[in-house]
Image: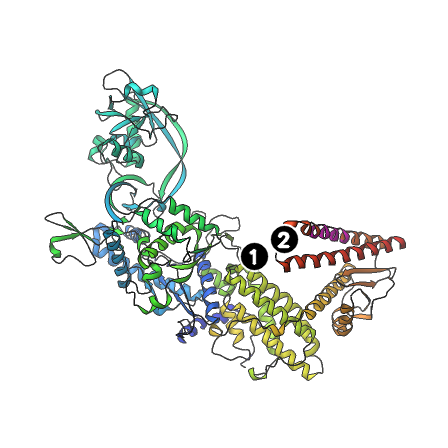
Amino acid sequence: MTDNLSTKYNPQEVEAGRYQNWLDHDLFKPNGNPEAKPYSIVIPPPNVTGKLHLGHAWDTTLQDMIIRQKRMQGFDTLWLPGMDHAGIATQAKVEEKLREQGVSRYDLGREKFVDQVWEWKEEYAGHIREQWAKMGLSLDYSRERFTLDEGLSQAVRKVFVGLYEKDLIYRGEYIINWDPQARTALSDIEVIHKDVEGAFYHMTYPLADGTGVVEIATTRPETMLGDTAVAVHPDDERYQALIGKTVILPLVDKEIPIIADEYVDMEFGTGVVKITPAHDPNDFEVGNRHDLPRVNVMNDDGSMNDLAGKYAGLDRFAARKQVVKDLEEIGRLVKIEKMVHSVGHSERTGVVVEPRLSTQWFVRMAPLAQEAIANQETADRVDFYPPRFNQTFLQWMENVHDWVISRQLWWGHRIPAWYNKTTGEMYVGMEDPKDSENWEQDPDVLDTWFSSALWPFSTMGWPDEEAADYQRYFPTNTLVTGYDIIFFWVSRMIFQSLEFTGQAPFKNVLMHGLIRDEQGRKMSKSLGNGIDPMEVIDQYGADALRWFLSNGSAPGQDVRFSYEKMDAAWNFINKIWNASRFVLMNVAGMDYADLDLTGEKTVADRWILTRLNETVAKVTELFDRFEFGEAGRQLYNFIWDDFCDWYIEMSKEVLYGENETAKATNKSVLVYTLDQILRLLHPIMPFVTEEIWSKLPHVGESLVVAEYPVVHPEFDDEAAVKGMATLIELIRSVRNIRAEVNTPLSKPITLLIQTSDPEIDQFLRNNQNYLQRFCNPETLTITSVLEAPELAMSAVLTGATIYLPLAGLIDIQEEIARLEKELDKWNKEVKRVQGKLANERFVANAPEAVVAEERNKEKDYLDKQQAVTQRIAQLKMMG
């Protein structure tokens, strides 16, 4: 044993140097035992766009808890770290930095710009590793990966070429979501819809034959410059005669046809719509059906191009104002109708997304989605926690669109397609074309999520299927991630893994929620309510933050951060620290070999070991179900209430006594129980538990690789649990009564105990020393036959009733009123439990043990109800 703990818990002191010590001893690497069952997790790779936030802290804390527990349980564990190049997000950050210096990426050119991004990546990867260390994450850094490293790039090419050869990747001209600031395509899920104030602009197009006009309405009048038709519903009687005629497109003076298409909603507006195939996804489909030309009137930066005529060069929103003004001047504007509508914005740059005709690369999703849906009916299915997210996953897969995977960026995986400079022929392959000087590579890069979708197997060495890690640790066991990226990432990992490895990439997916502020608002820069987890650690320590995050909520639920909760977390650790100091001071000089649990134990010893067994069983089961909040509650109650408040206090009865044999046993139980508590807590709060454990008599180099607690049936003692429950209830009742009548514990009292259960009677007689210590009776009577004193405070317990004769200190009427409140409580409990037992479905379907427990409660509540009723009657006769 080493020195005792310092007098005060100081997290900075406790945590300093500890992480590096773990790394120096290679404690986070797989154990290399071929007999051990493998258990692997890949970290959701954070983007190298900045520092980690509280959401990352939550996500990684949960993963670390799982992997630390499995490591202690003897699994061959791998927690693989890594980071994501985050194409559009990182490029946007670096371009923003360059703009501040008055430079654009075009000034630098592609190669030099990419060099700048690599420099950014190295800087922020360093920040992220520092934060991982500060959080105490037990990652195997020897296996760290990056989505743009050589091995992962090979995997990306293999997947692209494989999908292309199966005709699951194709190149085509479609309407896509376009970010005019980043100048790149976006997938549907990179678009955030926000309600904004807008307008319906009503205008008239004159019929070419001069017989009248048609009225149409649009929210984007600037796109009318690219109209190639107007459409009506074929069954709309109002416009039957117009089908086949033409109208003159105002401001452009171009003749365009009136077509009939079922896409038009007869009930909406005038029933006539403009068709702009190059600027609207629905119009694009209509244009395909009617072989309409596609006129794109915008540049990639959102300005109008030469096809927009006199509006060329204007920003799209400036052009909108000018078009509306010009329509008004020529008498074609009917009205402007104000409205609020949902408008797509780029998730990364925040600008309004422009639907735009563009040639892009797409993944044909239907076959891949069907494979993923079918897999959920097999033994290889992915289990979601909470299960409701399985339905979310299936619904998305059933309604998925083709995925646009090309991005007009310079940072990312270059698309492995080349075009012959002479013939225009296209080549797609793993290797560059042999006569590369005659070929030009596609300038686009792949969507970030394309490479992230391969993360669970590309990080393990795939496409080399003989790679040791791929053979040993894939498929992975558990993925932990926020519910907000189930579509972005989780779904894509599943269908890519099934397609290329024939297996689901993980068995379990634990979905957690979002961290919100105290008012329930999402944390954001605009609200200024973000919390830096590193600042929280500086104030409270990593263990306190991890304890708060682990106990935040049930799976899938959001959690609210508050400093009040952080105070409570720190207080809990401080309670453990002080309890540990007490134990260490009382077992000074004791070695591991001195531990002996075979001696005669007190009822408190037997009780705490039984409660420890129950806690180990419950916490292990709850960890397996990822119900960490409930596991934390079980640990908190056992540690704070049972161990600290009761067992340690009861140990003093032995420790301060004269019986050396009893002392030796008591010290062994104290050390053993604290040791097991530290092991149970270690996955959640690794620093402080390691610090305390290192001072205890122990065997092994570190708690990181110590054995996780298991249930020891030989410790179970139901009689001790039953007796202690009565003893604790009795002591609490005496303390409550003393408080009610302002009688301090230092003042001796008369304590009368009337027992109604022979076992309880014998137990209380055998353990009068505890009653003497915790109740301070001047006289103590334990009997089954007792005439209730006239003036006394009383409490009805399980198997006993206590009386404290306190003449002159109580008012009979007040005591009757207090007992009537208590009677009301027992009446309600009796009604509730009897209602439950009267429910035939509950009795038939609930486990036998649960029903038996409810019947025991009924008997207990009825006994207490009867005892309180009798006591009230007695007092009323006296009053």
Using residue 339 as the reference point, say whether residue 549 is left or right of it: right
Q: Is residue 818 magenta?
A: no
Q: Position of residue 855 (x, y in %)?
A: 70, 57
Please give the name of the residue rendered at 36% of the width and 60% of the height, measured from the top-left corner. Answer: 456
User: In this orientation, does residue 686 appear?
Assistant: yes
Badge 2, how many Cα within 10 Å: few under 14, some, many 20+?
A: few
User: In this orientation, does residue 589 appear?
Assistant: no
Amino acid residing under circle 2: Ala
Residue tagged by mark 2? 844
Residue tagged by mark 1? 564
**Which mark is nearer the camera, 2 or 1?**
2
- Compared with 214, 59 (above or below) is below
Q: Position of residue 614 (x, y in %)?
A: 60, 67
Q: Is residue 830 magenta?
A: yes
Q: Which mark is residue 11?
A: none
For the residue labelled by badge 1, is the local secondary structure a helix, a strand or a loop? helix
Please give the name of the residue rendered at 11% of the width and 55% of the height, measured from the top-left corner. Answer: 437
Which badge, 2 or 1, is on the more N-terminal residue?
A: 1
- Compared with 725, 410 (above or below) is above
Q: Position of residue 201 (x, y in %)?
A: 34, 27
Question: Which secondary structure type mostly characterizes the magenta part of the structure?
Answer: helix
User: Magenta part of the protein: which range?
Assistant: 822-833
Using residue 591 as the reference point, say whether residue 840 is left or right of it: right
Badge 1, how many Cα within 10 Å: few under 14, some, many 20+?
A: few
Please give the name of the residue rendered at 54% of the width and 59% of the height, measured from the top-left corner. Answer: 629
Question: For the residues marked 2 and 1, what is the alpha-carbon distance in whole angstroms?
Answer: 44 Å
Seen from the viewer's position, the closer of residues 38 and 510 is 38
Using residue 718 as the reference point, say whether residue 184 is left or right of it: left
